[in-house]
Each structure stands twice: as structure tokens, then as C-alpha cells.
Image: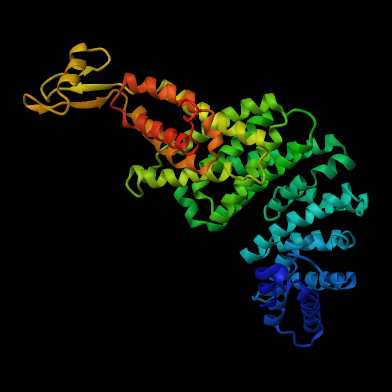
């Protein structure tokens, strides 16, 4: 309760923070020293400290060290104990406030890594998730200790890295593989500094090799996706591995000075495309981690501008195709096409709005490439239709048959002999694609920054107007134009013309 009050009222309760944190620490210490510690009390105090420490830590250095020792003790696995509340809350406190312990961690770095790896393969899925979150933050503190203030000795670092290298080299160690993949990525700067860039390139090659064998192959060999639903653990493993690989690639690529080879770029494309194609299958808590990992990788690629422009063009094209594709569930009536599209658009909406991660150049490049791809697609679509006078009459292409064009003009919606005038698309798939594209823009554009879209108004309007003159009865064209004009209206786009 005290921690929740500090979190909610912040500065208003600041003058109580010294006393409350001191009291919570002493309560925790007494429970750990007791012969019969109360589990609920320990969990409550750890929760209170997690919330109270968000604004400031008023504990003395010896109290911070004492808190670290007790948190580390609380994380230890106890055989035959099914209650994991203390363990999970201790990991949450450590993960949230790891910077408080940055001066202490170097003294316990090797032991903490060993403990963390053990927790990453715990039987309890919530413990494993908490341990994986903790590992990333722990690795960053250790990496900073190596490359920034040099509080961790090089020999200790080599011992830690050797643990992860052994995991990567062991073909049968799948349970700790995710942890090793992430660790190599986080340690990439330290590996480059202390073990040279060639060693880091060797680790990248090893990760690519493992990814081809253990990730891409599993997805490509998946003949019946429904079988995955029978093995929940297998689904989680694949999703976690996917995110770990992308995260690690982004760290490593950010440190390498050489431009990525075509082979490496193609591998990145395949891995990222797997994530997009399986986006709707990702559990909610892993979706946002995937978006963030993908942003990080694109940012790392963007420093190699020539390769980046080619890569992102190819990736945006493939991703847009996957977004607009009607899934089997919609085809067979399990869900509506509209709902499937909204769910697929979540990828673009969330990915493009990670403002705290994107650089302006990278995000604008991705958005511009998306709009360019859309405009190019619209230009190439065959939206012509055939005019059918009656069931007995033969159809004729509207753009070729002057008589049919005249009939359209003279008999708008009127009966002609034994039947109504009807219009049949020359290419149904193109008409369907345009409709999905119009719905896509209608949903996505309002969720992105208007200034991104405003500069494209002249070109996209020109393309739509030309298409509508050629085929005036295609409603989806006017839907796209309406979306564009709504953006213009919000910013008084045409005021200067007046």
C-alpha cells in the first residue's frame, strides 16, 4: 500500500519516502532473518519497494547492498516448492531497478549470470519469462561495466562469454539457447572492444547458421499450422527465438563497421518476414517485443544507406502483400475480411509509432517507401470492367467498345429490354486488392502522423484522379481520395490556394 501511494502521488509523498523505504527494508531484513519467514509479508514488501523506488532511492549504500543480497537469495530455486511468488517478485524488483545495483553487480557478475541462466529454464513459465526479462537488463549493466567504467575485469567477461559460447556450440542445448542468443547481442560492443571485431563477426555467422537450422527450417517445414496448437511450449519457443535473433542481429549490426553482405541481408529479410507472416499468431505480450526488435534492426541497417534503401523496399513490398492478403479464416467464413485486415494493420500501426525508438530518418524512410509502394500498385492495377446488357447479350470491354460506353451513359440504372445493366470486373483480384488497399489506408493514416502523409497528397491525388477518369465507377478510388482529403481538412491544406 505504501509503495502504491508513493507511485500514485509522487512528489506529494516525497517527505515520507526516506522513512518508508527504510522501514520496508528493515521489515524485509527481519523476515529473512526469522526462523519462520512469512511469504506474504516478503512479497508485499518487495512489491512496495518496487513501486517506491521508481522516483528515488533513499537507502544508504550498505542498505542497498543488503537489499541486493536478499533479492539474490529470494531468487534461488528451492526444490519441491511450488509457490514462486517471492522468486518472481524479487526478479521484478531487480529488473525494474537494476541501475540501483550497478556498483554491486560487478562483484557478483559471474554468479548472477549463472543464476539467471538456471532461472531461464525453470519449470514455471512465468519464472522463465521474468528471468529472460532480467537477463537483458543484467547483460546491459555488465556490458556497461566493461566498456564504460571498466568495473568488470576482462577475465570475468571472458568466463561469462565462454558460458554462452558453450551453449551456442552445443547442438542439444535448446533450453538455454534463447538466453545465449540475447546475451551475445547485448555483449556485442564488449566483444568488439576486448575480443576484436572478427570474433564478433564469427558470432554473427554462428547465429545465422543456428537460425537457418533451428528457426527458419522449422517454419518452412511447417506443413500443417493447426498442429502447432497442440504444442503450446513449441509455439512459445519459436516466438521467443524469433525475437531474440532479431534483437541480437540489431546489436551486432550496430557495432560492425563493414557493410552487411548480400547473404546476411537476405537472411535478415527471411527472419523478419517470418515475423510478419506469423504476426497474428504471436501472443500479445510478444507482439510489442517483436515490433521493438524490428525497429532496432531497421535502425542498425539504416546506417548503411545504399543497402538499407534496397532492403527496406523489398521488405515493405513483402509486408504489404502479407497485410492485404485475405487469410484462409476469412475465405472460409471463420472471420470477416474487415476484422482480419484490422488485426493485420496492427503491425503497421504499432511498428510505425514506436517514437521513442525510431530515428526520424529511418521512420520517414519506411513510411515513404510504404506510400511509394501503394502508389505504384494503384498505377498498375487493371480496374476496367465489362458492361453486361442482359443475360442473352454478350459482354464487351468498357474501354474498347464505344457502343457499350454509350450504353453506360444513356441507361444509368435503367432497365434495358429484359434486364438491368450490370458491370463485371475484368480482373476481380485487382478490384479486391484495391478495396483492401483503400480500407488499409482508411484505418492506418489517422493513426500515423499527418505530416508524413501530407507531402504525398499531390502525387496520390493525381494518380487517383487519373484512375477515376479511366474507370469512374470504382468506389474504392474515391475512398482513398476521401482519406486524403480528410488529412487535408485537418490542416487547412488548401487555404493558401484560396
Looking at the image, can residue 33 be seen? yes
Residue 330: image location, x then y, percent:
36, 44
The quadrant in which the N terminus is found is bottom right
Q: Is residue 209 left or right of residue 238?
A: right
Q: Is residue 220 left or right of residue 186?
A: left
Dividing the picture into quadrants, the one containing residue 312 is top right
Dividing the picture into quadrants, the one containing residue 77 is bottom right
Of all residues shown, which one is farthest toward the left? Answer: 417
Which color mode does the image show? rainbow
Looking at the image, is 112 positioned above or below residue 251? below
Residue 173: image location, x then y, percent:
70, 52
For this rendering, which residue is in front, 97 or 315?
Answer: 97
Residue placed at 84% from the left, 72% from the top?
Answer: 59
For this rendering, which residue is in front, 188 or 346?
Answer: 346
Residue placed at 91% from the left, 51% from the top?
Answer: 149
Looking at the image, can residue 242 be seen? no
Q: Is residue 43 left or right of residue 235?
A: right
Residue 475: image location, x then y, percent:
31, 31
The quadrant in which the C terminus is found is top left
Dividing the picture into quadrants, the one containing residue 92 is bottom right
Residue 115: image location, x then y, percent:
78, 63
For this rendering, which residue is in front, 99 or 485?
Answer: 485
For this rendering, which residue is in front, 154 or 455?
Answer: 455
Q: Is residue 408 left or right of residue 177?
A: left
Looking at the image, is 214 positioned above or below residue 4? above
Amino acid at each position: 500500500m505504501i509503495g502504491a501511494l508513493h507511485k500514485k502521488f509522487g512528489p506529494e509523498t516525497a517527505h515520507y519516502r526516506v522513512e518508508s523505504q527504510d522501514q520496508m527494508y528493515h521489515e524485509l531484513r527481519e523476515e529473512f532473518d526469522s526462523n519462520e519467514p512469512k511469504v506474504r509479508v516478503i512479497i508485499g514488501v518487495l512489491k512496495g519497494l518496487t513501486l517506491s523506488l521508481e522516483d528515488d532511492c533513499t537507502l544508504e549504500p550498505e542498505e542497498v547492498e543488503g537489499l541486493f543480497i536478499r533479492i539474490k537469495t529470494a531468487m534461488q530455486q528451492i526444490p519441491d516448492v511450488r509457490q514462486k511468488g517471492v522468486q518472481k517478485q524479487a526478479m521484478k524488483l531487480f529488473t525494474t531497478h537494476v541501475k540501483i545495483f550497478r556498483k554491486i553487480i560487478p562483484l557478483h557478475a559471474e554468479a548472477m549470470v549463472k543464476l539467471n541462466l538456471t532461472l531461464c529454464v525453470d519449470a514455471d513459465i512465468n519464472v522463465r519469462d521474468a528471468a529472460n526479462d532480467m537477463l537483458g537488463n543484467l547483460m546491459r549493466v555488465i556490458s556497461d561495466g566493461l566498456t564504460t567504467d571498466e568495473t568488470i575485469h576482462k577475465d570475468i567477461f571472458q568466463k561469462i562469454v565462454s558460458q554462452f559460447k558453450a551453449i551456442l556450440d552445443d547442438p542439444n542445448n535448446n533450453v538455454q539457447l534463447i538466453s545465449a542468443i540475447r546475451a551475445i547481442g547485448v555483449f556485442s560492443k564488449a566483444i568488439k572492444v576486448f575480443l576484436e571485431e572478427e570474433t564478433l563477426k564469427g558470432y554473427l555467422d554462428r547465429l545465422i547458421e543456428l537460425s537457418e537450422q533451428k528457426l527458419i527450417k522449422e517454419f518452412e517445414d511447417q506443413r500443417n499450422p493447426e498442429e502447432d496448437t497442440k504444442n503450446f511450449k513449441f509455439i512459445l519457443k519459436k516466438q521467443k527465438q524469433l525475437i531474440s535473433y532479431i534483437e541480437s542481429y540489431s546489436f551486432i549490426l550496430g557495432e560492425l563497421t563493414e557493410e552487411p553482405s548480400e547473404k546476411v541481408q537476405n537472411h535478415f529479410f527471411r527472419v523478419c518476414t517470418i515475423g510478419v507472416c506469423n504476426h497474428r499468431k504471436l501472443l500479445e505480450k510478444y507482439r510489442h517485443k517483436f515490433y521493438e526488435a524490428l525497429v532496432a534492426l531497421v535502425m542498425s541497417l539504416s546506417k548503411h544507406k545504399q543497402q538499407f534503401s534496397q532492403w527496406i523496399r523489398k521488405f515493405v513490398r513483402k509486408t504489404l502483400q502479407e497485410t492485404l492478403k485475405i487469410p484462409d479464416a476469412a475465405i472460409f467464413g471463420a472471420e470477416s475480411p474487415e476484422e482480419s485486415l484490422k488485426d493485420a494493420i496492427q503491425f503497421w500501426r504499432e511498428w510505425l509509432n514506436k517514437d521513442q525508438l525510431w530515428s526520424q530518418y529511418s521512420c520517414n524512410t519506411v513510411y515513404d517507401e510504404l506510400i511509394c509502394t501503394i502508389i505504384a500498385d494503384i498505377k498498375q492495377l487493371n480496374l476496367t470492367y465489362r458492361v453486361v446488357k442482359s443475360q442473352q447479350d454478350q459482354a464487351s470491354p468498357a474501354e474498347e467498345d464505344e457502343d457499350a460506353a454509350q450504353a453506360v451513359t444513356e441507361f444509368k440504372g435503367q432497365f434495358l429490354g429484359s434486364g438491368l445493366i450490370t458491370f463485371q470486373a475484368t480482373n476481380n483480384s485487382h478490384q479486391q486488392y484495391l478495396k483492401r488497399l483503400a480500407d488499409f489506408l482508411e484505418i492506418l493514416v489517422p493513426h500515423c502522423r499527418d505530416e508524413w502523409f501530407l507531402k504525398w497528397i499531390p502525387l496520390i491525388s493525381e494518380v487517383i484522379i487519373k484512375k477515376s477518369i479511366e474507370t469512374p465507377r470504382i468506389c474504392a478510388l474515391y475512398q482513398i481520395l476521401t482519406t486524403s482529403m480528410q488529412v487535408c481538412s485537418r490542416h487547412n491544406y488548401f487555404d493558401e490556394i484560396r
